[in-house]
Image (tube, coloured by chain):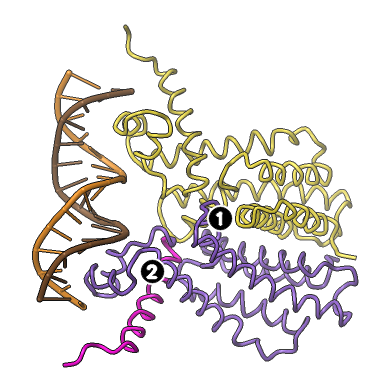
Chain colours: A yellow, B purple, C orange, D brown
Amino acid sequence: MPRRSAAAVAETRSGVAHAAADRASVEGLEGLTIGGLAADVEMRKSSLFSLFGSKEELQRATLEAAVESFRREVWGPVADEEPGLPRLLALCESWLGYHEREVMPGGCFLTTATVEFDARPGPLRDEVAEIMERWLDALRRDSAVAIEAGDLPAGTDPADLAFELNALAAAASYGFQLWRDPKIFDRARRSMRRALRGGRG
Amino acid sequence: MPRRSAAAVAETRSGVAHAAADRASVEGLEGLTIGGLAADVEMRKSSLFSLFGSKEELQRATLEAAVESFRREVWGPVADEEPGLPRLLALCESWLGYHEREVMPGGCFLTTATVEFDARPGPLRDEVAEIMERWLDALRRDSAVAIEAGDLPAGTDPADLAFELNALAAAASYGFQLWRDPKIFDRARRSMRRALRGGRG
DNA sequence: CCTACCGATCGGTAGG
DNA sequence: CCTACCGATCGGTAGG
């Protein structure tokens, strides 16, 4: 019997990291414990520990797994839409749908991680900040295209719009988790459309 | 020497609860530990424990202290403004100022508590949900007055507006904590004004 | 408000 | 991937 190959170990790691993301979306990345996760995946604590080497490395891998899920489920389906307003509108649907289907059982992982680490300097906060920046940048770029194309009022600040859309999606997710009423996604959808249209009336 | 009076004990409790709110705004309500807090307030762990009787009761008192701070610092200064749009505008300033001054060192306590407990059923989640509902209701009521007065577009849903304002204030707070750039409050201010004016252009 | 404890669990190590 | 540990810390208790 040879030792398990590096590829097999990487696969195990990835599976564990995805289970960890589910758990951490509920309990938080800091609330994640190696013992608790080991029970979920039916391994011994020390086995799981040796897969990652430290709790921080497990947290990092968990963040990565959550980003991968988000990218696949939210961005993937709309990546081929026309950049600008058409893709932004499709993205908002995809995004809210992701939270409504509860792909992550505890709601928006990135918001949870942001709120959890925003006031705790360290490598995890830096990683969260970078992920969030990249996401807001993607929103900003499509907003800029939409303004350029005349699909949004001239003078709109694309970064303002990115900030607004992100704030609304996050609030829909935690509001849904808190009250368990999916009508909040309709509310968020109206608010997003208003932001994208540039007004209420 | 008589035993400490009930009033003196209540005062100690209140002081500890406010120190706990500061700590929990950074570490989270679940991350709060009796031992860590005891070091902050220079008491023994068991003394602090006996003040509250359980960790859950300490968490409850901490939530209460945070709400009291928010009410005093955010709502207090604008309570006497004219209900409707004038008070909403003043409230947004007061609210963003509260987060910019970092009255709570870790940012918006209620958002932290919401995101922390939204997916964990139990008495703390119920309490967080009730506090959040009361706050959104206050925003909704002033929005309704503003619409009635013709200061906002007819047909505006006051609950949508409350949702938007809350989403934006929360996002400003965690964005500021994450990036330490106070310009995000200008961004949030523009977004709130737009929401209150009903449009971009 | 204190000293002196309790069992359970934490992250992590040794060694196979 | 396992058994068998480690010191530290957790929430909580007994008794003053």
Left or right: residue C8 compared with residue B147: left
| Location of residue A120 in the rendering, given as x and y in whole percent from the top left corner | 42, 58
A185 in relation to B196, above or below = above
Q: Which residues are magenta?
A: B1-27
User: As shown in the figure, which amino acid type bears the numbered disc 2?
Assistant: Leu
| Location of residue B183 in the rendering, given as x and y in whole percent from the top left corner | 61, 67
Magenta stretch: helix, strand or loop mostly = helix
Q: Secondary structure at mark 1?
A: loop
For label 2, the residue is B58
Depth order, front residue of B147/B122? B122
CA neighbours of label 2 inside 10 A, class few (<14), some (14 to 19), many (20+)? many
D13 in relation to B62, above or below = above
Marks 2 and 1 share the same chain: yes
Q: Quadrant of residue C4?
A: bottom left
Depth order, front residue of C3/B153? C3
Q: Secondary structure at mark 2?
A: helix
Depth order, front residue of B192/B71? B71
Quarter of the image that includes the C terminus of chain A:
bottom right
- Compute the Cα span from label 2 to label 1: 19 Å
User: As shown in the figure, which amino acid type bears the numbered disc 1?
Assistant: Asp
| Residue occupying image coordinates x 85% and y 55% | A152
Which label's residue is closer to the chain start, 2 or 1? 2
Identify the disc placed on residue B118. Answer: 1
CA neighbours of label 1 inside 10 A, class few (<14), some (14 to 19), many (20+)? many
Subunit that carries the residue with mark 1: B
Left or right: residue A129 compared with residue A9: right
